[in-house]
Amino acid sequence: MMKFNSLKNEIPLPIRLFLGKALLFFIAWEIIYGVFLLDSNVLNNLLTSHVAVSSAFVLNNLSPMSGFTAKEEIYTEVLGGETTNIKSSVIYHNNYKVLNIAHACNGLELLVLYIGFIVCMPSKIVRKILYIILGVILLDFINILRCVGLIYLQEYFHAYFQFAHHYLFKIIVYTATFLIWVFYSRKINFKNESIQIG
């Protein structure tokens, strides 16, 4: 117990306050998601469908390619001996399946992580709201471009698809998130954190 107190006292108060708020935000999100959102999948379904429809729109209207459609599909998966129906969004190119967008790829967890960081950092409420709105729009757009890039690789450079899917595009998305955080953190004064909280 003594070591924990001495270790705790070595961490500056503003950092402890930030970590405490981050822990509370994480617990609150897990409770809200687990109790209200997980079973219904309303948020996941909306976001996954949005990413698929937007990706097809970008491909059809803002690229030299065309003939893409997004469709909702349900497939069955056996998890722990139980059969579960899982909804996903699939992008077709001239009725040929080119990309399956599962809930894990819709960017929800990244958006929550991004928002949590902004909420927990000390700053004016207006600035927080502005960065949350602009950041969510930007990260959502980057995720859509990621899907567009994956489809392009699937169509023309299939050998690079797996590498881009598992590594390259994830690095790009997380780097963009980190850069927004760095930009947001530039004008933050941690000295006032204890005053703002108390």
Image (cartoon, rainbow, N blue to C red):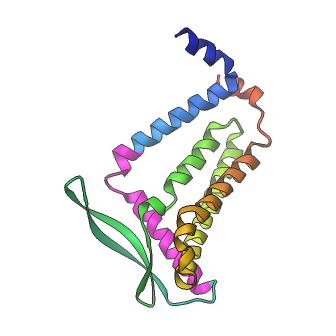
Quadrant housing the C terminus: top right
Where in the figure is residue 155, as x and y percent of width and height? Answer: 53, 84
Could you tell me what secondary structure mostly forms the magenta stretch? helix
Q: Residue furthest top?
A: 2
Report if residue 59 lies within the magenta region.
yes
* Residue at left offset 65%, top offset 48%: 129
- Above or below 141: residue 171: above
Residue 95, placed above or below residue 14: below
| Magenta region, residue range | 33-61
Residue 22 higher or lower than 64, as above or below: above
Q: Is residue 122 left or right of residue 42?
A: right
Q: Position of residue 142 (x, y in %)?
A: 62, 65
Single out the residue that lies furthest toward the right.
187
**For this rendering, which residue is in front, 167 or 30?**
167
In which image quadrant can residue 12 be found?
Answer: top right
Residue at 54% x, 73% y: name it. Answer: 161
Point 59% across, 79% down: residue: 58
Q: Height in image: 47 above or below 157?
A: above
Task: State left or right for residue 91 relative to residue 190.
Answer: left
